[in-house]
Each structure stands twice: as structure tokens, then as C-alpha cells.
Image (cartoon, helix red, strand yellow):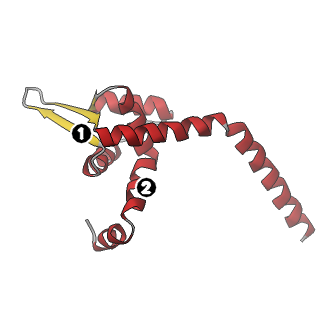
Amino acid sequence: MTVSNEVGEALCPYRLVLEHVTSRWGVLVLIELLERSYRFGELRRAVGRGSGRSVSEKMLTQTLQTLERDGLVHRDAKPVIPPRVDYSLTVLGREAAEQVRGLAAWTRDRMEQVETARRTYDEVREERSRTS
């Protein structure tokens, strides 16, 4: 961890957790893991299906490590050949994932209103710029 991250974490630790939980890939990982545990490759495909874009191995690894450090994801490495690693939610992670899923559902349900508000905003700004 860098010095600036340490300072930020010390000053506002909950903000960093909120950023981790609500990050682009964090949201999708948490929602997918609500359903069941996944192996890395399975989770990568599931997250890609959920977002319509594929997540790189590096980004998924970083996201899982961050969520594991925050106590939200459990990594279970089994000593078998070939190696098997499963990812699941902790109790804390399940709580966070339920909240995130609720926010995602609200966003989906209210998208038409958001789009209307955006159009209205853009029209007002365009009109102002023409009259200025």
C-alpha cells in the first residue's frame, strides 16, 4: 500500500470500502457470488456475461484480492492437482452484496426516469448555450 493510500484509509476508511464495493467490477463480482461460489474462470465468464464486456484476468484478480482484504470474499485454495481455487462471499460480503443488488435493481427500475432527466438537462444546457 502506498503512503497516499494509507493516509486516505486512515482519514476516511469507509470511503475506500465503499469504492471497492461499488467499483465497476466489484459490483458485478458481489452480485454473481450471491448466487453461488465460483472458480476463477467461471466467475470471469459470469461477470463478463453480466456486464456485456469481458473483465481481464488482472482486473478480476485485483478486484478479488481487494474484496478479500476487506473481508467480503473468501478464497478457498484446495491442495489438489490441478490447483482448484473457489471464491465465495463471507457473511459480511453477503450483506454488502444484498445492498449492491438492491441499488442495481433500483437503477434498472428507474432508468427511464434517469434518461428523461438527462434529456431535459441536455436540452436546457443547449438552449442556454445558444442564447449566451
Looking at the image, residue 62 sits to the left or right of residue 121; the answer is left
The quarter of the image holding the N terminus is bottom left
Quick one: label 2, few (<14), some, or many (20+) residues within 10 Å? few
Tell me which amino acid carries mark 2: Glu
User: Would residue 27 appear left or right of 113 to someone viewing this image?
Assistant: left
User: Where does residue 117 sit, x and y in percent of width and height?
Assistant: 76, 48
Where residue 85 appears, as percent x and y from the top left, is 19, 32
Residue 112 occupies which quadrant of the picture?
top right
Q: Work out whether mark 2 precedes mark 1 in sequence or the reverse, and give the earlier one.
A: 2
As helix, strand or loop, the secondary structure at mark 2 comes to helix
User: Where is residue 129 drawn, in percent x and y?
Assistant: 85, 66
Determine whether the residue tagged by mark 1 lies in a helix, strand or loop. strand
Left or right, 1 with respect to 102, comes to: left
Q: Which residue is mark 1?
A: 74
Relative to 43, say whether 99 is above or below: below
Q: Residue at x 78, y 43 (%)?
A: 116
Q: Which residue is mark 2?
A: 19
Q: How much space separates mark 2 and mark 1, taking CA atoms?
A: 19 Å
Amino acid type of disc 1?
His
Mark 1 Cα shell of 10 Å, populated few (<14), some (14-19), many (≥20) = some
Question: Which label belongs to residue 47?
Answer: none
Circles 2, 1 touching at the beta carbon (< 8 Å): no
Front one among 59 and 27:
27
